Amino acid sequence: MILPQDKISRRHALIHAQEHGRFCFVDLGSSNGSYINGRRVVQPVILKDRDQIDLGPVRIVFRDASDSMIVEARDGQLTLHEIRTVDLWLMVADVIDSTRLHQLVSDTEIPQITGRWLADCKNHIEAHGGSINKFLGDGLLAYWPSVTDPSRIAMTVRTLRGMQESHKLPFRVVLHRGQVLLGGAGSLGEENLTGRDVNFVFRMEKLAGLLRQGLLLSAEARKALENEFSWTEAGRHSLTGFDGDFVFWIPG
C-alpha cells in the first residue's frame, strides 16, 4: 500500500501474517514512527480487531475476520490444512538485553534502531531464500527448505555476523536443521511450524544466552555447513524439556 505523505517513510511498516490466523505489525525503523491506539510501536505487536494504526497523518483501522472464521468452522465450512512432516533449516535471531538498550539511548531512538534491525534481518534472510515465519517481541523465527544449497545458508550467517559487528543493536543467532510439522488449522497463508525441533531451536537460543555466544549451531546444522566455516565445539549441554545432552558448535 502506497501512502504518499511526507511523514511516511518509503519502507515504513508491514503487517505480517503469523500462525494461528494472527497478524503482527512491525515498524521497519521509520523516521517518524508508527502508533497503535496512541502508543508508539517499539517492537512487533500482535494486532487486535479495531486497533487504530497511525502512520503520520494517515489512520488505518485493522479489522480481524477471526469471528466469522469461527462461525464458518462451526458450520463445517472451514477445512484443516494437511499436516505433513518436512525437513527445514530453522533460525532464531533475538536481541540481547533490550532492557540495557533503554538505558543507553533515548526513547525516540529505540523504535528506529529495533525496526531497522528487523528490516535488515528480514531483507538478508529473504535475499538468500529464507522466509520469516513469525516476529517475536525482540526477534524472529526464520526457515528454509532443507534442500536449500548450504552456501545460501552460509551467506546468511556471514551477513548476520557482519551485522553483529557493525550494528548498534547486539543480538544472537542460533541455527538448527530438523523435522517440523507443517500445516494444521488455517493459518491465512503463513506456514504453521510446530514440533520437537521448533521447540529445540528456541531452547538453543536460551542456551546461547547462558553461554554468551552470538552464534550457536546444533550438530545437525554444523554437519551441513562443515565445508563453509571452521567450527569449535562448544561442549555438550542439556536443554530444558529434552532428554540427554547435545553437542553445540561456535565459529572458530
Image (cartoon, rainbow, N blue to C red):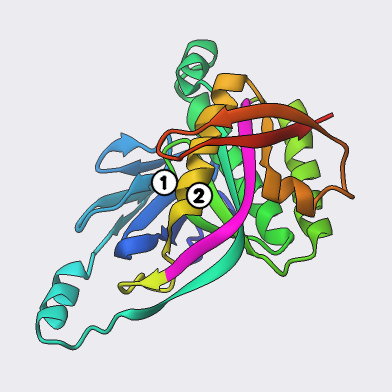
Question: Can residue 211 be seen from the camera position used here?
Answer: yes
Q: Give the magenta range.
A: 169-182
Dot 2: few (<14), some (14–19), or many (≥20) neighbours within 10 Å?
many
Q: Quadrant of residue 217?
A: top right
User: According to the image, label 1 marks what residue?
Assistant: 56
Q: Position of residue 9 (x, y in %)?
A: 55, 49
Q: Position of residue 155 (x, y in %)?
A: 81, 51
Q: Nearer the viewer, residue 118 or 176?
A: 176
Kindly state the secondary structure of the residue where label 1 is placed. loop
Q: What residue is rendered at 63% in x and 48% in y?
A: 176
Dot 1: few (<14), some (14–19), or many (≥20) neighbours within 10 Å?
some
Is residue 174 one of those drawn in magenta?
yes
Question: Mark number for residue 8?
Answer: 2
Q: Amino acid at mark 2?
A: Ile
Q: Amino acid at mark 1?
A: Gly
Nearest to N terminus: mark 2 or mark 1: 2
Q: Position of residue 114 (x, y in %)?
A: 54, 34
Q: Nearer the viewer, residue 89 or 1?
A: 89
